[in-house]
Amino acid sequence: MFKNKVLSEGCVDFIDDAKIEALIKDTPEDAVKVREIIQKSLNKQPLSVEETAFLIKADSPELTEEIFEAARKLKRDVYGNRIVLFAPLYIGNYCINDCKYCSFRRSLRSTVRKTLNEGEVVQQVEALEDSGHKRLILVFGEHPDYSAEFMADTVRKVYSVKHGQGEIRRVNINAAPLDHEGYKIVKNSGIGTYQIFQETYHHETYCKNHPEETHKGDYLWRLDGLSRAFEAGCDDMGIGALFGLYDWRFEVLSLITHSLYLQEKYNVGPHTISFPRLRPAHGIQFDEKYFVNDHDFKRLVAILRLAVPYTGLILTARETAEIRREVMQFGVSQIDAGTRLELGGYSEDDKEEQELKREQFSIGDVRTLDEVMSELIKDGYIPSFCTSCYRLGRTGEHFMEYAIPGFINKFCTPNALLTLSEYLEDYSSDKTREKGYQLIEDEISKIDQEKIVKKLRERLERIKKGERDLYF
Ligand code: SAM
Ligand code: SF4
């Protein structure tokens, strides 16, 4: 697919397995040091890989609780109580790769293959808009049919679909790494984040899971994927690791290494980090050796929060509602909701059972968007569909400087409340509407600047009268 594989300028393999293994093994348990590091993080300073290793080593109940508490506090300070909602939309599951853990892998003949055609994309997007979604992530297998032009056309199509009061205001992508030219084409279609998960940063494990003769078998091409994206103008990048392939501690330290590498080289860290846990899937046999239990999963989310205070953390519906509820407090900023993974699934009648041959893996949280909204509101979160920063060009390097408390009070919270009120007007159940408006009132009463309250109330009234897409 790529005639010449041109890597980013000065590309190096910045993951040193031996160094990371040594950090995991040799970093001492040191409560005093851990508390110092927690304090640094509470002052909103990113941690080094070495400092992160101290947090990983701290597994006594007492220190674990201190880490959890610090993560909760940091999340409140940096992100407030907003949770951004999105939905994944699978466009096609043909794939030329053969990743051992994925039911889309080419050697698995029994998987039902499909690529949505234009009409089907429209139908899915309409169904998503009808439930209230404003932000999507498009997911693609890796296949010559899914060229950069195809992705860009799909993105444009998605933005063009307007159904009732609905529209999609932000389209992100999760797909294979591209070459510079490909990223430019995709960028031109107006994407938000380009997400690439390294899956595992551990070289040997990577080779075991991604056969060498496949595209994805090229570790460095993938590791370098977002560096090329940046060089080609996509400054909004999402990294991630698939937890369960190798030691979670190794993956956390590698994610931080990757994040610092991007930050140092380009002056922009990743916008988001994802940490999916391996799920049962059609035709997949699990080696449970590195399965991450719930306790360690909570620890790793809290540690990531402390290590990269300004990076969004994405928690998906792979996890059950119960785990999501718990982990959200430790610093998650985005979740998907009302998720359907089967291609074409959003326009089908509700059915309880997933048909695994048609989708990538089984999901843990099958609730509707309204059910998730209702629970978030009950738990005191502001569900948000805000897309303002990205639409006003506040991304990349600029995003960092805006993620400060004053900015949240002035922009993020009011914008979250405006998008919530749109949802309540257009899509919510009566029960959610009542609770939602109560939450809006409670949140307004916490804003201490009269000018902001006045502007916000004026916009909320305009939304009630039928205007949409108002933001600061
Ligand atoms: N084909 C592209 C790629 O591999 O980069 C797009 C991504 S794939 C459709 C989306 C992500 O799902 C993968 O990067 C992987 O982390 C995750 N995934 C694959 N199999 C999984 C499984 N069994 N359980 C949980 N997540 C899985
Ligand atoms: Fe294909 Fe991506 Fe699945 Fe690998 S993870 S088989 S590249 S869809």
Image (cartoon, helix red, strand yellow):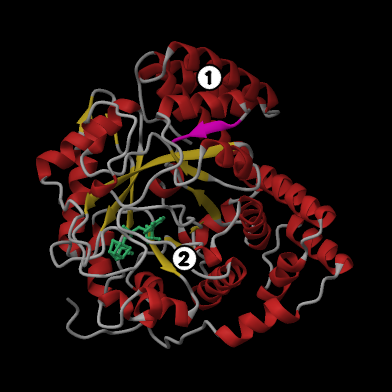
Q: Which numbered disc covers residue 287?
A: 2
The magenta region covers: 381-385
Quadrant showing the N terminus: bottom left
Image spot of residue 219 (x, y percent): 38, 80
Spatial distance from mark 1 to mark 2, Cα to Cα?
44 Å
**Looking at the image, which residue is at 79% across and 50% down?**
65
The residue sitting at 33% across, 61% down in the picture is 102
Mark 1 and mark 2 in contact? Answer it, CB < 8 Å.
no
In depth, the one of 11 and 331 nearer the eye is 331
Magenta stretch, overall SS = strand
Residue 384 within the magenta-colored segment of the rendering = yes
Q: Is residue 464 left or right of residue 453?
A: left
Q: Earlier in the sequence, mark 1 or mark 2?
A: 2
Residue at (62% x, 68% y) in the render: 249
Measured as percent of width and height from the top left, residue 127 is found at: 25, 30
Disc 2 residue type? Asp
* Quadrant where ligand 2 appears: bottom left
Using the image, determine if residue 199 lies above or below residue 153.
below
- The residue where tag 1 is placed is 436
Tell me which amino acid carries mark 1. Answer: Gly
Q: Residues within 10 Å of mark 2 (few under 14, many from 20)?
A: few
Label 1's element?
A: helix
Q: Is residue 158 above or below residue 306?
A: above
Q: Is residue 397 magenta?
A: no
From the top left corner, tell me how far across and down residue 223 is, in percent: 41, 76
Based on the displayed image, in which of its 4 quarters is residue 187 positioned? bottom left
